Image: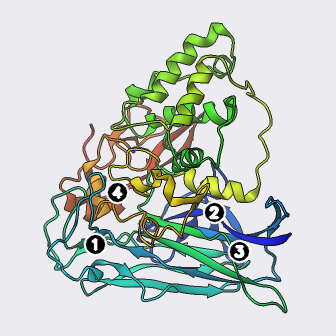
Amino acid sequence: MGTVYKIHPAIGVARVGNHQSAFFLGPEIPGSPGVEIGPGGAETAVTAYKKDGRIKRQAARFRVFEYEQDISGNLELIGEVGAEAHVEWSVDLVNRKAALDHVAGPAARRNRTVANRDSLVIRSPRPVTVAGADHGPETLAGTFLGKQVYLGEIRTDQAGRLIVLGGRGASGSVPPGAPLDNFANNDRWHDDVSDGPVSASVTLPGQKPVAVHEQAWVVVAPPDFAPGIDATVSLYDIAFQCGITKGALRPETRPSFVRHIKPMIERTVALRWVDDWDQWAGLVPLKWDELADPAPANQRIRAQVAARVKDPDLTMFELPAFLRTYLDQWVAGDFVSDLGAPAAAETVPRLLDRAALERCTGNNFFPGIEGGLNLKDPDIYSRPFRLDRTNTGKVYPGCLTEIMAVPWQADFRACEGDWWPSQRPDRVMTDPHDVPGSVADWEAPIGPFQEMVDNVQRLGFIVPRQAGAETVFVEVDRDPQFTRRRP
């Protein structure tokens, strides 16, 4: 028997923003918008993603949990480490996009004429540490071709939990004005997204420090401009499929309608708020009682809806195998009809792992948005949802974001109408009382890539609003001086 410490979430997600101080914590409960920390440490749900016209950064928060291991290796959750424990955190954020030396999907070898590859890697000279409660901020920064680049900062909250903040969405070139003519590969350009390991040690009174056994990873991504709209396939689904492939996870014998089928349908239908309204509106209103009923009489409607989920007409869309099997079982009537049943209990660590990844796009890694194609590689995981830091050939600081577009704003511009409207909207509603009559191009009037670099932080966020008895999603907080055309 012995004590095992783990950091959760196993993979945390932060996002850049250009406000100097305002931030919120990313979702820690599935379906939550995230929270803001107020005076005295009070936490309230985030309701606005901009302040004073600037984008708030999304922070990733990490906690240490204690488990008890029996002689057979089974773990029992004891709980989050208490105030008596002194936790020291260490973070190593790295951006190595410009130093990419291989081809991965659309990502190609970059900056071939720069012999000193280290000069292209943005990284603090050493990992940055914080410890105890209310410590920090401590800055992470590096250089790109001699130019100083801020990557973020770390701090702790009142309970000594780690908070990681990323960059401020600043992209540029050395020298200024370098060509920006490709959606993924632009030499002498950099941005300030990153990723890297999160480590910790725990010291109990009168004892020596103990390194946390299962450490974590953090990804700093671009903003999510439609935080209440989720992709049909999430990064959680991608990691779950990798766990199945490795034999570490098993799909359920019969899918639950509430836990497996209904969320896929809801996520697909919600794309109408950020994509072509007419394409998706035909799926609503949904007759949940019929869809949850396994009777043969409802098989036709189940098949119609399943077909749309399997093929939502998004470029390069692919369902993970276990989700496709779940849909096939549902259509055949082989599922658990549990509509209206109480939600199954989940531990806090599992909720943290799931919430962080469910808000990320798990499809169409061309090159991706929060992370790249390597997230589909089972070899990078040691355990479900946890990266294998011993596999140094595939897992190293900066590995998850290095194949992403440089700068990310170019990919945002190029991908209008493609595969991730849940993060980068295509068409949006601007008036909650005029749906769909108030539809507008989200990015208009942005043209060339450079215009997206210059103006992306002026664009609006898509959030829920009440229109009578109905919840609709509309654009808010767009710069009122940034006028556009109607589609």
**Residue 99, label in figure:** 1
Q: Amino acid at mark 4?
A: Pro
Q: Amino acid at mark 1?
A: Ala
**Residue 41, label in figure:** 3
- Total labels drawn: 4
Q: Which residue is mark 2?
A: 9
Residues tagged 3 and 1 counted as in contact (Cβ below 8 A): no
Under circle 1, the secondary element is helix
Q: Earlier in the sequence, mark 3 or mark 1?
A: 3
Mark 1–mark 2 distance (CA, rounded to whole Å): 28 Å
Residue that appears at 69% across and 28% down: 254
Q: Earlier in the sequence, mark 4 or mark 2?
A: 2
Q: Can you say whether 310 is above or below 121 in the image?
A: above
Q: Which residue is mark 4?
A: 480
Left or right of residue 264, residue 131 in this image: right
Q: Can you say whether 465 is above or below 301 in the image?
A: below
Task: Give the mark toward the camera: 4 or 3.
Answer: 3
